[in-house]
Image (tube, rainbow, N blue to C red):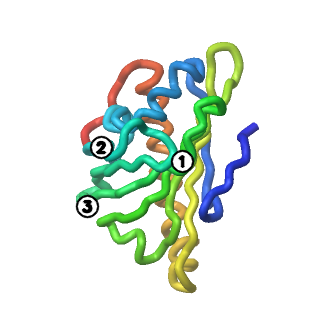
Amino acid sequence: MTTAYTLPAPIQGTDSIVVDKPVAELWPLVADSTQLTRWGPPVLSVQVIDTPEGVGSRRRVEAAFGRKRGSFDERRIIHDEDAAAMAFVIESDTFGIGTMLDNVGSLMVLEPAGEGRTRLTWSFFHQPRGPLARLMNRAVILRRQRSNRLAALASFKAYAETGATRPTP
């Protein structure tokens, strides 16, 4: 069962996957931002701005979604090593997400799922900004977020279990 955390906006979607590795082996792949380049499908590079990484630390993620390249400046708002949970909120981006959504971010939680197995649950949260954003959220944004989340979960599982890095975006 996922531990409850206070997030800056409502959860808009959640998916999970079971990985054939224990939590202790997976936590570094989630907690260390530089690992995103190995398994995060849209990630081109990560610059950790504040070390050590923990609550309040920031990172810049360069990413590609199709032909569109840009960056996210994110701040870690949860870093709970005991519960194996971490969350980021996007403070600025070059993709234009902030024009429609406030408090955009994600929460990742690792939980034991049997002998040597772990369930990774990934939730995206945000608050639509106004009526048009609420409409776009239902019509487009939630589907795109889910597609991105499912691709990232599958890529995480493949990397964790076999060492297969995702293709370069």
Amino acid type for the residue under numbered disc 3:
Lys
Q: Residue at x 45, y 43 (%)?
A: 151
Residue 68's tag is 3
Residue 105, percent from left and from top? 51, 57
| Mark 1–mark 3 CB contact (< 8 Å) | no
Extreme residue toward the top, this view: 115
Q: Marks 2 and 1, Cα distance to the nearest angstrom?
A: 16 Å
Q: Which residue is mark 1?
A: 87
Residue 46's tag is 2
Circle 2: is it few (<14), some (14-19), or many (20+) Cα within 10 Å? some
Amino acid type for the residue under numbered disc 2:
Val
Q: Nearer the viewer, residue 83 or 100?
A: 83
Q: Is residue 167 left or right of residue 155?
A: left
Q: Quadrant of residue 67?
A: bottom left
Q: Residue at x 63, y 15 (%)?
A: 116
Q: Nearer the viewer, residue 15 or 44?
A: 44
Query: In the structure shown, which secondary structural element does the residue marked by tag 1 occupy?
Result: strand
Residue 17's tag is none
| Mark 2–mark 3 CB contact (< 8 Å) | no
Q: Is residue 14 left or right of residue 46?
A: right
Q: Quadrant of the C terminus?
A: top left
Q: Quadrant of the N terminus?
A: top right
Query: In the structure shown, which secondary structural element does the residue marked by tag 3 occupy?
Result: strand
